[in-house]
Image: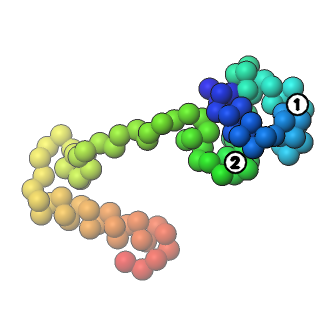
Amino acid sequence: MIGKRLRELRKGQSMTQEQLASFLKTAKSTISQYENNINEPDLGTLIRIADYFAVTLDDLVGREAPYPLKKDRSATGMFKETLTEDESNYLLDSLTIYRKWIAGGKP
């Protein structure tokens, strides 16, 4: 999954597998396994690679676009019953106060 993109990034920096392995404190064979999609790096390693090459994790793993958000983000979309606009606003206001309270802030 990450192999092709990792190879592109590494070669774009004129970097050898040995150099990347040294940076990541791992073996050259590990980099080769990543690039050939035999093994995948753990999350911590993915983050270090993304930071090194100044790319996002989405870019590194080949995710082209974020998953689309649901269009109905209103409180009424959570219930099977239909809420009035006043009821929906009340719930959203209550949720805002609750979130501030949980975060330690004053409502």
Q: What's the CA distance linking mark 1 and mark 2?
A: 18 Å
- In primary-sequence order, the first of circles 1 and 2 is 1
Q: Based on the displayed image, in which of its 4 quarters is residue 43 positioned?
A: top right
Which residue is more in the foreground, 81 or 49?
Answer: 49
User: Left or right: where does residue 27 sit relative to residue 34?
Assistant: right
For image coordinates 84% across by 33% down, the residue present is 17
Q: Which amino acid is tagged 2?
A: Phe
Residue 28 is labelled as 1
For image coordinates 73% across by 26% down, the residue present is 35
Q: Which amino acid is tagged 1?
A: Lys
Quadrant containing the C terminus in the rendered view: bottom left
Q: Position of residue 14 (x, y in %)?
A: 79, 40
User: Left or right: where does residue 42 sit relative to residue 23?
Assistant: left
Kind of element beneath mark 2: helix
Residue 53 is labelled as 2
For image coordinates 66% across by 52% down, the residue present is 54
Q: Position of residue 63 (x, y in %)?
A: 51, 35
Residue 96 is labelled as none
**Residue 45 appears anywhere in the view:** no
User: Left or right: where does residue 106 sit relative to residue 77?
Assistant: right
Q: Position of residue 40 (x, y in %)?
A: 71, 28
Which residue is more in the foreground, 53 or 14?
Answer: 14
Please give the count of numbered marks on the rendered protein. 2
Kind of element beneath mark 1: helix
Q: Is residue 102 above or below residue 106?
A: above
Q: Position of residue 27 (x, y in %)?
A: 90, 32
